[in-house]
Amino acid sequence: EIVMTQSPATLSVSPGERATLSCRASQSVSSNLAWYQQKPGQAPRLLIYGASTRATGIPARFSGSGSGTEFTLTISSLQSEDFAVYYCQQYNNWWTFGQGTKVEIK
Amino acid sequence: QVQLVQSGAEVKKPGASVKVSCKASGYTFTGYYMHWVRQAPGQGLEWMGRINPNSGGTNYAQKFQGRVTMTRDTSISTAYMELSRLRSDDTAVYYCARDIAAALSLWGQGTLVTVSS
């Protein structure tokens, strides 16, 4: 099983600042990597797939990069609605999720 | 409107089985894989498996092999996930999610399954 490791576990950021979230795979997943946002009491929402392609309706302030084993999700200027938990997921070899990064208000 | 609507919350005793449904609307049900993902209270997301609604073919995560069964009824555009021999650590919200290019683009609202004696 491919293990996905996210860092940091919690990220404290002020509104308007940039947030950078990391995701590492235990072996190469090529570009078969997605990012999801989850708010309390809600289902996850797909943000990015193919490591860097924004899903339909996702604002341009969300961007993804990386390939192989190292990936990054960047939120260029945090809005109030962006404070949530973010998960990466690989789908190169079945599907596995990272443990999540909580983005909280500083 | 493209959506997935799941069945309501369930309370089960240890050792019992639960069957959760996921009704699709607004798109061709047989055109996309359907996945099941669960989330224990305060925990992360865990992939359980997927079903091809067209063929009925399934793939299950190794952890759930032998305990999970995914089926579908194409006449009513509904997918099902049945989990047997329930334990307390199966208490979780169970989600169905539609696959697009292997990422999970459309999610149901979730079904809370509580396992308690």
Image: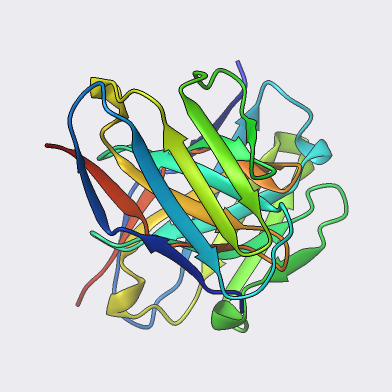
Residue at horizontal 38%, vertical 43%? A20
Q: Quadrant of residue A100?
A: bottom left
Q: Is residue B101 left or right of residue B12?
A: right
Q: Position of residue B102 (x, y in %)?
A: 72, 48
Q: Quadrant of residue B3?
A: top right
Residue at horizontal 31%, vertical 76%? B89
Q: Position of residue B55 (x, y in %)?
A: 88, 54
The vertical placement of B79 against B12, above or below, is: above
Visible residue check, residue A44: no
Instruction: Name the quadrant of the C terminus of chain B.
Output: bottom left
Q: Looking at this view, is A9 or B24 the one in front?
A: A9
Q: Is residue A26 left or right of residue A12?
A: right
Q: Position of residue A87 (x, y in %)?
A: 43, 51
Instruction: Name the quadrant of the N terminus of chain B.
Output: top right
Residue at horizontal 74%, vertical 59%? A30
The vertical placement of B13 against A43, above or below, is: below
